Amino acid sequence: MDISYNINNNRHNISIEKKLSQKFISQIEQAKSDKKILLIYDKNIESKFIKNFYELLKLSGCKIFLLQLEGNKSNKNEKLLFKILDFLILKSFTKKSILISLGGGVLGDVCGLAASLYLRGLIFYQIPSTMTAMVDSCLGGKTAINYKKIINSVGSYYHPYHVYIFNDLIQTLPNKEFLSGIPEILKCGLIKKNKIIRYLNNKKESIIAREFEIIKELIVESLSTKIHFFQNDINEKNTRLYLNFGHTFAHAFEMSTAKLIKNDYLRHGEAVGIGILCELYYANRKSKQIDIVQKILSDFNLPIKVLDENKYDSKLIQKIQSQTYKYIFLDKKKINNNPRYISLKKNFIPKTEEMKNNELIDETIFKFIK
């Protein structure tokens, strides 16, 4: 199944496939490359899939280079970026060469940035390997690294020539990794009318069982929602901002727990789920939508608080509250002195607003820590 969209008169495609097939090779041929491919893949992907994909790529008749990297949050930095750029230079890649990213959101973001910078742009394919990447970050052209302890502070917009989503990869995901994509799907169901909320409420067993047709439908609905908001606002001046619903608090929680507990204590999707609750609470402390979101997150065994209250002491709670508050005011969406967030009105219509009540920000953080 294919989804397509146009940016600056260029057509971009997303294919959702049940299995690896030679259809991918036909797309490589259409790209009119110089027959050089760099496949960058995450070390955590099952070796069997990498081997099968490499054998498929060989059918293209291209010269294939492999680069294994580790796409965790702590590596989303200038070191990883320049490791990719150095490799491209060393192997004399050209503007007509192909870079394929096979990994999660971190690797996709950094590979996309490298693809946009090298000779001002080469041919870029993205194959997301995590659910969060499949339903969100693989699409929209955002590329970035974290710099000076600020998430996504250095980046560009560079759209992949083609995105491929393979069910083979979905089936290999660890359960925690698979479920952490649910909040990004939920986000899309909250900011635009579609089938998502109904599916999450009524198809829980099928989703947990990873039935391909149901998962495909959720991916299609999520990516179509994303296209709806970004296609006419690529540079995030207006409607594209709505796709950040939950992310102001989520990024701050990610950074504070990484600093005070450990890296990846919260998966990005898990943090987004808690962030959605925070932004609903900040907008309206009595919102009935909070109950809807809490139920769905709980149904999929996702956290609705940052910490297990029986596990951590009050000093740590205070430190997380203080650090999270600080990081909220470093959020990249901030224009004036106040951070911005996405409020959701009663009829589920999103709106970008400033957070001007510092006491309520603090109260919101504390409420969802434990």
Image (spheres, rainbow, N blue to C red):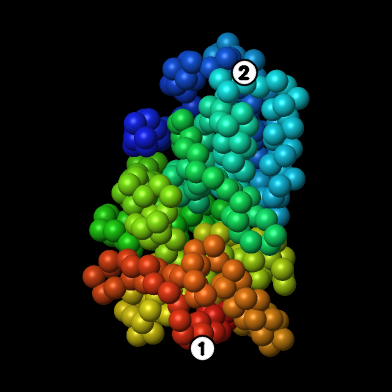
The amino acid type found where label 1 is placed reads Glu
Residue in the picture at 69% in, 81% down: 319
Is 77 left or right of 138, judged from the image as shown? right
How many other residues sit within 10 Å of disc 2, few (<14), some (14-19) or many (≥20)?
some
- Tell me residue 73's x, y (percent): 66, 54
- Would you place residue 364 above or below residue 32 in this image? below
Residue 148 position in % (x across, y down): 70, 60
Q: Residue, x 34% and y 37% (percent of image)?
A: 5
Please tell me in which quadrant of the rendered image residue 62 appears: top right
Query: What residue is disc 2 on?
Result: 36
Judge from the rendering whether residue 226 lies leftward or rightward of residue 174; answer left or right.
left
Q: Which x, y percent locates residue 83?
A: 74, 37
Secondary element type, mark 1: helix
Q: Which kind of residue does numbered mark 2 sit on?
A: Lys
Spatial CA distance of label 1 from label 2 is: 56 Å
Query: In which quadrant is the N terminus drawn?
Result: top left
Q: Earlier in the sequence, mark 1 or mark 2?
A: 2
- The correct choice, above or below, for 250 with respect to 180 in the image is below
Residue 323 image-quadrant placement: bottom right
- Please say if 18 is above or below 354: above
Which residue lies at the image location 42% right of the left edge and 54% below the top edge?
Answer: 236
Residue most toward the top? 61
Mark 1 surroundings: few (<14), some (14-19) or many (≥20) residues within 10 A: few
**Could you say whether the residue bearing mark 2 is in a helix, strand or loop?**
strand
Quadrant where the image shows the C terminus: bottom right
Does the rendering let one see residue 140? yes
- The residue that mark 1 highlights is 359
